[in-house]
Image (tube, rainbow, N blue to C red):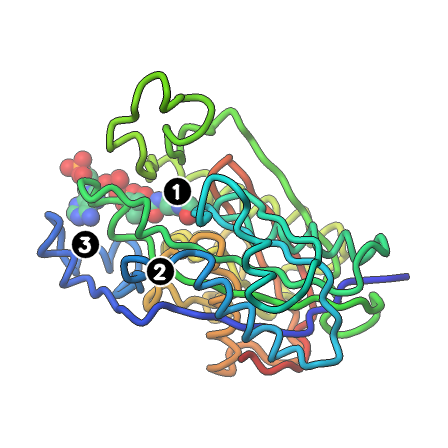
Amino acid sequence: MTAAVLAGLGTHLPPRRVLNEELAERFNTSDEWIRSRTGIRQRRWADLGVSTGDLAVEAGHRALKSAGPDVTVDTLVLATTTPDHPCPATAPDVAARLGLGEIAAYDLSAVCSGFVYALACAAGSIEAGRSRGALVVASETYSTILNPEDRTTSVIFGDGAGAVVLRRGTPEEVGALAGFDLGSDGSHKDLIHIPAGGSRQRASHAPPTPEDAYFTMRGREVFQHAVHRMASSSTGLLEQVGWTADSVDRLVGHQANLRILHALADELGLDTERVVTNIERVGNTSAASIPLALADAVARNAVAPGDRVLLTAFGGGLTWGSVVLTWPDLTPA
Ligand code: UT7
């Protein structure tokens, strides 16, 4: 049998650090509020003119370097909420800039669950024999869609990109993606959305107000869904693959909020030492948050080869998804 095996990991953060103190001056908030409600101390924001594609190229380049020259990549899936343009997709441009040739390249839109969804798509192509290897990139520039009048969202989100390389292998190999759970509930689509910019609200008919062009989130309701959906997706997947919750060495959840991650661990019966977090330093980077957290954890030796790792994400849509693997011996670049 064929499986998709994790072969490389790379990340990129824009250099500009935005500390809570800086936002406290601009918004009617404080470092204390942001830290106690979210766990965030700082995030990175891209400078004007730097796009999602630019961050994706950097992360993609590093993931390819981490995988080494022996892995063939013939597919690129780019998960993002903030593409460079409404049309065309950002992925073909990223593939061209990475020198990957005329490979299959497409964007995937699943908001904060985008990385897990993109992994599932790429793994499916490898398992079906349509792809020999894939670059999965999650890249976001939320700073470009945040409403400067909305202190709740503006203090949470950060920019960044993470990427992994998947290669064709077998299910017995360390690093094989051992199972997925994906789901959605569109009846709650308004909890996280950007009202304008698509076909629903036509710019040609009624130009959007500035507020309609910005990202909105009903935070408190989203919080409840996030904990519940990531917990039930994780539990369902663990059952599917025959792992007990106790056998999970590291839980790498979407870095939405430190309180959400702790509540999730509690639901799963995992002590917080097994919870991987880097939200303190990068904020909520949406689709990019899981690969960024993973690379950070590997660098701190908080994830080691042989560890059983559960990745779980939740986002707008609503969407959610989980994946499990045994961590391979790789060096992120
Ligand atoms: O990544 C996709 C998924 N996203 C998430 O999972 C995010 C989920 N939600 C959250 O993380 C939290 O709901 C937030 C961090 C967004 C908000 O925290 P909260 O504890 O749920 O606060 P809240 O929205 O219930 O607001 C509590 C109070 C309100 O004031 P009143 O009505 O109690 O007087 C807000 O106006 O906090 C106020 N508030 C702020 N105060 C200072 C909201 N934002 C701020 C702020 N600074 N930045």
**316 relative position to 244: left or right:** left
Callout 1 amino acid: Phe
Which quarter of the picture shows residue 331?
Answer: bottom right
**Depth check: 130 or 175 in front?**
130
- Mark 2 lies on a secondary structure that is loop
| Residue 254 pos. (x, y %) | 48, 55
Q: Is residue 33 above or below residue 204?
A: below
- Give the residue type that dot 3 points to: Trp
**Residue sitting at x 60%, y 79%:** 65
- Above or below, 300 relative to 97: below
Give the alpha-carbon distance from disc 3 to disc 2, as whole Å.
29 Å
- The residue identified by callout 2 is 50
- Which residue position is annotated with label 1? 223
Give the residue displayed 46% in from the left and 74% down from the top: 296
Q: Amino acid at mark 2?
A: Val
The label on residue 33 is: 3
Badge 3 or badge 2: first in the primary sequence? 3
- Mark pair 3, 1: CA separation: 17 Å
Q: Is mark 3 within 8 Å of ligand 1?
A: yes
x, y percent for residue 131: 79, 58
